[in-house]
Amino acid sequence: MSVTLEDARRVIAAAEKRADEIGQPMNIAVVDAGGNLVAHVRQDGAWMGSVNISINKAWTSRAFDIETKALGENSQPTQQFYGIHATNGGKVAIFAGGVPLSRDGAVVGAVGVSGGSGEQDQTVAEAGAAAF
């Protein structure tokens, strides 16, 4: 099981809707079970510097089957995952906006969002994941 292009389009549409509601243009990426990019959108006005960040958030969320927000909280000094952001060639994102996508109790992909504050990225990613 994995994320199809149809799934990714549905997730992105819901995330775009939420980004429009909060007035923050976003980069939105969806990856499959292997962490491979299925689809990405950069809304008009979204930072081009956030393209790779959104993809890395999705990849990180799938690679570790955890929201990047939670991974970030657990990667602070004295926490169990301190230093994890320096692994995997620096691809690991440890801030809010990456959310796993599950089907029948198994993680089959993830959505990653970047372009606003951590809170904005998280709410847009959650909206996308809810549409999955």
Image (cartoon, rainbow, N blue to C red):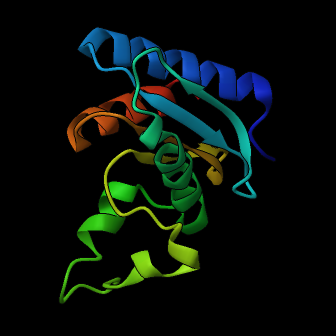
Residue that sits furthest to the left in the current view:
78
Q: Position of residue 64 (x, y in %)?
A: 53, 68
Image point (44%, 41%), residue name? 50
* Rendered position, 44 above or below 128: above
- Give the left or right position of residue 54, taking residue 37 as reference: left
Q: Position of residue 41 (x, y in %)?
A: 58, 25
User: Number of callouts in the render?
Assistant: 0
Image point (32%, 50%), residue name? 96
Q: Position of residue 16 (x, y in %)?
A: 46, 17
* Rendered position, 120 above or below 18: below
* Rendered position, 62 above or below 73: above
Q: Position of residue 115 (x, y in %)?
A: 35, 34
Residue that sits furthest to the front in the current view:
48
In depth, the one of 107 and 17 nearer the eye is 17
- Give the left or right position of residue 24, taking residue 52 as reference: left
Image point (41%, 55%), residue name? 67
Image point (79%, 33%), residue name? 4
Q: Quadrant of the C terminus?
A: top right
